[in-house]
Image (cartoon, rainbow, N blue to C red):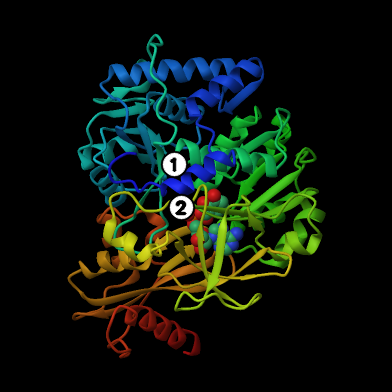
Amino acid sequence: MLPGAVPWPADAAAHYRAAGYWRGETFGALLRSVASRHAGRTAVVGGDRRWTYAELDRRADRAAAGLRALGLGPRDRVVVQLPNVAEFAEIVFGLLRLGAIPVFALPAHRRAEIGHFLDHAEAAAYVIPDRHAGFDHRVLAREVKARNVIVVGNAEEFVPYAEVPAEPVDLPDPDPSDVALMQLSGGTTGTPKLIPRTHDDYLYSCRASAEICGLTPDSAYLCALPAAHNFPLSSPGVLGALTAGAKVVFAPLPSPDVAFPLIERERVTITGLVPPLALVWLAAASATRHDLSSLEILQVGGAKFAAEAAARVGPVLGCEVQQVFGMAEGLVNYTRPGDPEDVRVATQGRPISPDDEVRVVDDDDRDVPPGTVGHLLTRGPYTIRGYYRSPEHNARAFTTDGYYRTGDLVRRTPDGNLVVEGRAKDQINRGGEKIAAEEVENHLLAHPAVHDAAVVAVPDPVLGERTCAFLVPAGDPPTLAAVRAFLRGRGLADYKIPDRVVPVAAFPSTGVGKTSRRDLRAALLAGLTTR
Ligand code: J2J
């Protein structure tokens, strides 16, 4: 196992192998075997590119050889920050075949996040588009002084990806029990954590997810959310669709004007959205002239989807709603196609695996009675046992017997489905984008006119939650515009920048200790709503 990653205990690993979850297969080998069975079928569509499985397989080989010629090798970490383009699949499979480890950054990440990932992962390379959504990623690459910058598009002084692919060479297949890729945690601390996922565990979650969703070679998955997110990558997402020999269609944007024509043209059967986008689709669907009749499943996840909205998916979009409650650390719950309407509308589903262990506990880690709300703890065949190179944080984020503390408050229904009732972690879930309160607070504290800062989630009818920063100013309070400009200047991703700033003379006193920040945030929020 890559040093800095936490392996499963030997007995658990042996059980996961014996049960057939871990099959000793790598992503590179999997693509090879799917391509041999479905050579002529379409694997990937993105922009004007349309590649068969044979073509994707060949491109992945050429990418692996070219990346190797650039000096990259097994276990090298490579920060990949690509939008939804066909090259995403080619480059990711190239890295996976080489045994190099993609670290999936989001297109929205900026200097603060990318600098941290490059540093923390000791990355050997950084893969970017030239420009995306009006932003020049080459400027960012210069700012973070990344080594080996590879650019899809106009590279300027960097390495153009178009010139990277080389004649395939024989490469040893990586160890399937080793780290394949790294996902990002939503985070609750000052710096985002990296989540190492192995070929064995991640491939299991992708394959099992594809089965649960009924994917076949005739299915077409529309990747509408940014592909780097764990949800559209693996639940079943791009990788799950490819395990099934299905077609992956990359949408450059998730808006109905872009996605609906693609659904019609490519006869898309399944896609996944966060709740605010699902609401936008519901609003747009009744008036659309596009034929959406191929759509069989609309997955909604990343944040709680209200039952009233979920109930409208069937009548308005003519497909089944599937709720997905997952996390990049592992555990993913799905409502199943064909579940009774009340399960699909009002619960967040049940785990993928019979060996996902789920506990619902009180503040002292004691199991609560069935049906009671408590903290969700989990361990299982595709849930990590630790973040990358974070021993201190791991001691808090996992129990001594290896359960991951999800920070979610859930209740289990008598039929075994989970309902998400809230959250105990210091995080804001802004329409599916996760924001660690402490990370934003630390940036705010660097402002000369800020004496103290507390960032809280405020309910929002569209996004579910928005971010409000309470500030104790040092002198004249900074305006919202000044705070936003300041945080942008520090290179913080846009979605983390507070929507609202409320100056207060002093913070209410809530005692001392670690939990006092949480109490403080709760007290401030209560003050805001009664104001
Ligand atoms: C309420 N909260 C939810 C849901 C996630 C599939 C789907 C989503 C993610 C994801 C993912 C929720 N209702 N349906 O990785 O593979 C909140 C919880 C959870 C956190 C994880 C996947 N679905 N959440 O959202 O790592 O708080 O993964 O712990 O980004 O999102 O966030 P993330």
**Which residue has dot 1 on it?**
133
Q: Is residue 289 left or right of residue 528?
A: right
The vertical placement of 164 against 356, above or below, is: above
Which quadrant holds the N terminus? top left
**Nearer to us in this view, 299 or 178:** 178
Q: Is residue 369 left or right of residue 511?
A: right
Q: Check mark 1 vs ligand 1: CB closer than 8 Å? yes or no.
A: no
Q: Check mark 2 vs ligand 1: CB closer than 8 Å? yes or no.
A: yes
Rendered residue at 72%/40% (across/down): 214
Residue 342 visible in the snapshot: yes
**Nearer to us in this view, 76 or 270:** 76
Q: From mark 2 to mark 1, how far is it between C-alphas? A: 28 Å
**Which of pointers 2 and 1 indicates the residue nearer the eye?**
2
Picture mark count: 2
Q: Secondary structure at mark 2?
A: loop
Rendered residue at 44%/30% (across/down): 92
Where is residue 212 drawn, in percent x and y?
A: 69, 44
Rendered residue at 33%/76% (across/down): 454
Amino acid under label 1? Ala
**Nearer to us in this view, 126 or 350:** 350
Where is residue 305 drawn, in percent x and y?
A: 64, 62
Where is residue 225 drawn, in percent x and y?
A: 55, 45
**Which residue has dot 2 on it?**
329
Task: Tell me where residue 213 sits by quadrant.
Answer: top right
